[in-house]
Image (cartoon, rainbow, N blue to C red):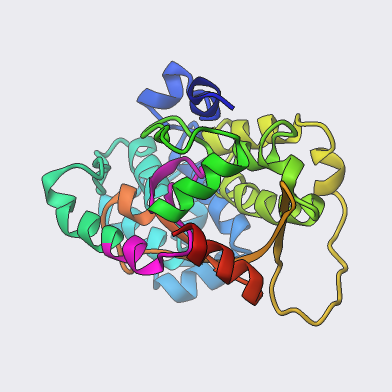
């Protein structure tokens, strides 16, 4: 797959999404959505937030308007993502409370250094940094090598720094999926992550649009509707790769940054790949 094809795997953004990211018409609708999403009754939310049930009822009906401090308090109690707390603030007429900076921003230098360190420590095995929509943010050398190998890219060809969506690379029948022996299980597992983001973001969000795009790939919708009933002894889902006579068995872990106060940092995911057998470990050590 050529570089231009790899770069095209990023989700498209409409002008409205890029500028506003507002998926609710008003604060009341957002609060009702998140309370229902978390399975809270008005009484439970009242008890845990120390806000009267009557006031919560008035907020959800639009009869009362919230203060900025109250919105932030409810966001903490309901464990609402930072991006969506900003959306609720905007819907109520307040400025966002959480910044969204690029990873190249000087104020995020310590975060970038920490990510570089974690990626380096994972070698000779692959590791990626992605955002909440699984757009590739950073990768270590073994990850770039593995992606180039799976996509038949020249070893000397660098991966694009922007525009690569890892979910699309894997789920596309013309991409990595054709080399996955257990692609149905892997795809179902990956869809779980973006489905959760879509449910968190609410209607009309980028995550919802990306999910719709992924479900349009051949065979993916059927996979998303079939539960994984595999009861084998392995305590993890192995990614079984078969290409050019090479068989690799990998499993992954997902890590996040602790107690972030920035939208970008809050949404970063560090995915580390580990060998599930000695042959896979030996292959990566040899390629290193």
Compared across the picture, whether 8 is left or right of 17 comes to right
Residue 157 painted magenta: no
Instruction: Please identify the quadrant where the N terminus is shown.
Output: top right
The residue lying at 48 percent from left, 59 percent from top is 126
Which quadrant holds residue 186? bottom right
Q: How many marks?
A: 0
Q: Position of residue 70 (x, y in %)?
A: 32, 57
Compared across the picture, whether 267 is left or right of 206 comes to left
Q: Magenta part of the protein: which range? A: 117-140
Foreground pick, 202 / 136: 136
The residue lying at 27 percent from left, 52 percent from top is 262
Which quadrant holds residue 16? top left
Compared across the picture, whether 58 is left or right of 222 comes to left
The residue lying at 69 percent from left, 40 percent from top is 171
Q: Position of residue 103 (x, y in %)?
A: 25, 45
Q: Position of residue 18 (x, y in %)?
A: 39, 25
Instruction: Please identify the quadrant where the C terminus is shown.
Output: bottom left
Q: Is residue 201 visible?
A: no
Foreground pick, 149 / 21: 149
Residue 124 painted magenta: yes
- When the figure is inspected, residue 196 is found, relative to residue 9, above or below; the finding is below
Which quadrant holds residue 116? bottom left
């Amino acid at each position: 797959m050529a570089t231009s094809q790899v770069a095209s795997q990023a989700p498209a953004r409409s002008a409205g999404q890029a500028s506003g990211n507002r998926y609710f018409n008003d604060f009341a609708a957002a609060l009702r959505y998140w309370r229902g999403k978390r399975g809270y009754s008005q009484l439970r939310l009242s008890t845990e937030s120390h806000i009267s049930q009557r006031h919560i009822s008035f907020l959800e009906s639009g009869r009362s308007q919230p203060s900025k401090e109250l919105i932030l308090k409810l966001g903490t109690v309901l464990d609402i993502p930072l991006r969506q707390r900003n959306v609720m603030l905007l819907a109520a007429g307040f400025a966002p409370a959480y910044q969204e900076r690029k990873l190249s921003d000087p104020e995020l230098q310590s975060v970038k250094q920490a990510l570089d360190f974690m990626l380096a420590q994972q070698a000779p095995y692959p590791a990626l940094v992605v955002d909440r929509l699984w757009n590739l943010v950073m990768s270590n050398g073994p990850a770039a090598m593995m992606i180039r190998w799976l996509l038949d890219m020249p070893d000397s060809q660098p991966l694009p720094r922007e525009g690569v969506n890892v979910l699309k690379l894997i789920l596309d029948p013309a991409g990595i999926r054709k080399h996955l022996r257990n692609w149905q299980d892997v795809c179902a597992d990956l869809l779980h992550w973006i489905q959760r983001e879509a449910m968190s973001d609410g209607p009309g969000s980028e995550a919802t649009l990306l999910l719709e795009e992924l479900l349009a790939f051949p065979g993916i919708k059927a996979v998303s509707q079939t539960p994984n009933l595999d009861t084998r002894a392995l305590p993890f889902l192995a990614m079984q790769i078969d290409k050019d006579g090479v068989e690799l068995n990998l499993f992954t872990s997902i890590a996040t940054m602790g107690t972030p106060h920035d939208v970008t940092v809050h949404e970063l995911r560090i995915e580390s790949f580990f060998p599930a057998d000695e042959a896979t470990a030996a292959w990566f050590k040899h390629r290193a």
